[in-house]
């Protein structure tokens, strides 16, 4: 039987951190409603303790979502967790997402504590969050560079404390797909209580591997993927959720028998809303949502597409919210594309006219 894959969107939190200016409350609300219509399972609505504006935005979005679960981010700090709970309490159900760094470089050079104290802080944070909700996510920041024995200890302790989702972020986009696969498999096979929580992954794109790493993690047993629409986010961005979703749909069976709740026909619409609200335009050649994603200018490709769309397209553009395949007329176009365009304009040519006039 297929297993449920949860889609966790952090466009309003991690995505906003990459923007030259903050989103307004109205813009955040429009994005949140579009994400809910898209079918994402969890919407990380913001970081409530960071500012009064963020707190109010999280509160207002949480009060209107009907299906998606609103989520607030907090450090492993009591005040952060309390602020999340206060901002989210208007929702019928909500998630608190608390985190602490676990890699040696973060523990030593940023937090300046020993790992045992970090583990205690993580456990304390999860327990405090559980006082407010039974939906608690715990993240091991910079998990990709965390010694595996420390990662196992932290994950086990967080689950014992009440975490129902444990997130394994590749915070700085450092890992490779094979490496990330091994990390997730090791957790699946060596953490005794891992069956009590959903394994989530949150990959950044510093080496251009965020999608590959996320897919490798799903194949290894992760059942939640965190990312953003259009891949916006810190530095080189987060994993682009639309790319992960369509890779899983197009190559079903390659990454485990999983299903999601996404309405893929809403992908392009949601992408455009995020681009317009954020001011970060999508590059033309971007997979799935770029303007050239389903455009063919080579005469050879155009001829193939006209005979059978699948010759040069692995997805139906209408499945993600585009219209029909585009065949722009360029210097590379051949007779087949010109004939097709003329027919669209109402000019039907005989084969002889095609041969002699085109």
Image (tube, rainbow, N blue to C red):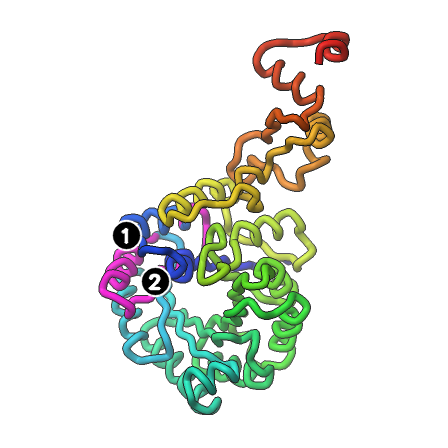
Task: Report the residue marked by disc 2.
Answer: 46
| Residue span colored magenta | 36-65
Is residue 3 at all visible to an observer of this figure? Answer: no
> Main structural element of the magenta stretch: helix, strand or loop?
helix
Whether residue 81 is situated above or below residue 39 in the rendered picture? below
Question: For residue 70: magenta?
Answer: no
Task: Report the residue marked by disc 1.
Answer: 24
Bin the neighbour count of mark 2 within 10 Å (Cα to Cα): few under 14, some 14-19, many 20 and up.
Answer: many
Question: For residue 43: magenta?
Answer: yes
Q: Quadrant of the C terminus?
A: top right
Image point 46% across, 74% down: which residue? 139
**Residue in front for this viewpoint, 256 or 17:** 17
Q: Quadrant of the N terminus?
A: bottom right
Image point 51% across, 72% down: which residue? 197
Whether residue 242 is situated above or below residue 144 in the rendered picture? above
**Residue in front for this viewpoint, 286 or 79:** 286
Residue 143, image x, y percentages = 53, 75
């Amino acid at each position: 039987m297929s297993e449920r894959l949860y889609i966790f969107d952090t466009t309003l939190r991690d995505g906003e951190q990459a923007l030259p200016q903050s989103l307004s409350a109205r813009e955040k609300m429009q994005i949140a409603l579009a994400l809910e219509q898209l079918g994402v399972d969890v919407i990380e609505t913001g970081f409530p303790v960071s500012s009064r504006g963020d707190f109010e935005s999280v509160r207002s979005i949480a009060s209107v979502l009907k299906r998606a679960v609103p989520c607030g981010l907090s450090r492993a700090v009591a005040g952060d967790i309390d602020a999340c709970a206060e901002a989210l309490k208007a929702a019928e159900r909500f998630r608190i997402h608390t985190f602490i760094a676990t890699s040696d470089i973060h523990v030593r050079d940023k937090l300046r504590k020993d790992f045992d104290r970090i583990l205690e802080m993580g456990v304390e944070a999860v327990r405090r969050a559980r006082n407010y909700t039974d939906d608690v996510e715990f993240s091991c920041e910079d998990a990709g560079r965390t010694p595996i024995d420390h990662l196992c200890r932290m994950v086990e302790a967080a689950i014992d404390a009440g975490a129902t989702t444990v997130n394994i972020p590749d915070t700085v986009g450092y890992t490779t797909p094979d490496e990330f696969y091994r990390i997730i498999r090791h957790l699946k096979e060596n953490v005794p209580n891992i069956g009590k929580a959903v394994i989530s992954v949150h990959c950044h794109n510093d080496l251009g591997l965020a999608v590959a790493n996320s897919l490798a993690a799903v194949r290894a047993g992760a059942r939640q993927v965190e990312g953003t629409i259009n891949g916006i986010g810190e530095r080189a961005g987060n994993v682009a959720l639309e790319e992960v979703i369509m890779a899983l749909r197009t190559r079903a069976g390659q990454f485990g028998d999983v299903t999601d709740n996404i309405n893929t026909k809403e992908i392009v619409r949601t992408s455009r809303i995020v681009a317009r609200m954020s001011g970060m335009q999508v590059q033309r050649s971007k997979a799935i949502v770029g303007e050239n994603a389903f455009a063919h200018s080579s005469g050879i490709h155009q001829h193939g597409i006209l005979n059978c769309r699948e010759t040069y397209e692995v997805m139906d553009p209408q499945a993600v919210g585009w219209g029909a395949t585009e065949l722009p007329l360029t210097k590379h176009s051949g007779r087949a594309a010109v004939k097709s365009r003329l027919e669209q304009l109402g000019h039907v040519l005989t084969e002889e006219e095609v041969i002699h006039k085109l």
